[in-house]
Amino acid sequence: MNISIVTVGKLKEKYLKQGIDEYTKRLGAYAKITITEVPDEKAPENLSPEDMRIIKEKEGDRILAKIPQDAHVIALAINGKMQTSEELAANLNQLALHGKSKICYVIGGSLGLSDKVLERANEKLSFSKMTFPHQLMRLILVEQVYRGFRIMRGEPYHK
């Protein structure tokens, strides 16, 4: 299976890079994983709703340009469906059984995802009703995908 993650912004924090590197290395035994960063739009603190929409659209166009045409797209969105780790594993397994070998997760910037990206998504996934920094979501996502493969294979993993 090919797992790609398209995300807004450059990862700067060393501790997050180390965690993501560790889980992508572990994931290598189960799937090919690539992480593609697209530039974020610089934005002042106080934005009008129109300014926010324009920024999300610009970032969204960059995201859409990086999504493989034949990928099954799962957008991380606060209003998406919440799943347990076991449900995430079952979903990955079902996608594989139905011949969906390219899965693309999308993580938006600090303002979220554009309507165009959400429309392109086959699924919307939420990890919580809380808001997390998009850089931290990368680490959480790769850990959960790794956990999902371990669950699918019936392999032990700490709880």
Image: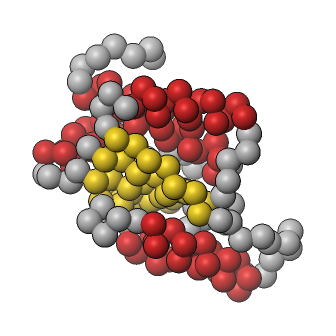
Image-based side of 47 in relation to 103, left or right: right
In the displayed structure image, the side of residue 105 where residue 132 appears, left or right: right
Q: Which residue is drawn at 71% across and 86% down?
A: 50
- Which quadrant does the C terminus fall into? top left
24 lies above or below 64: above
For residue 90, above or below residue 4: above
| Rendered residue at 57%/49% (across/down) | 129
Question: Residue at (68%, 66%) from the top-left corner?
Answer: 40
At 25% from the left and 38% from the top, the residue drawn is 90
> Residue 59 at what x, y percent from top left?
60, 72
Task: Look at the image and name its color scheme.
Answer: secondary structure
Q: In this view, does 71 lie to the left or right of 108?
A: left
Q: Position of residue 157 (x, y in %)?
A: 39, 16
Give the position of the N terminus as an image quadrant.
top left
Could one spot residue 88 in this view of the protein? Answer: yes
- Residue 81's x, y, as percent? 41, 53
User: Which of the 4 quarters of the picture holds residue 123?
Assistant: bottom left
Residue 7 placement: quadrant? bottom right
**Can the viewer see residue 126 in this picture?**
no
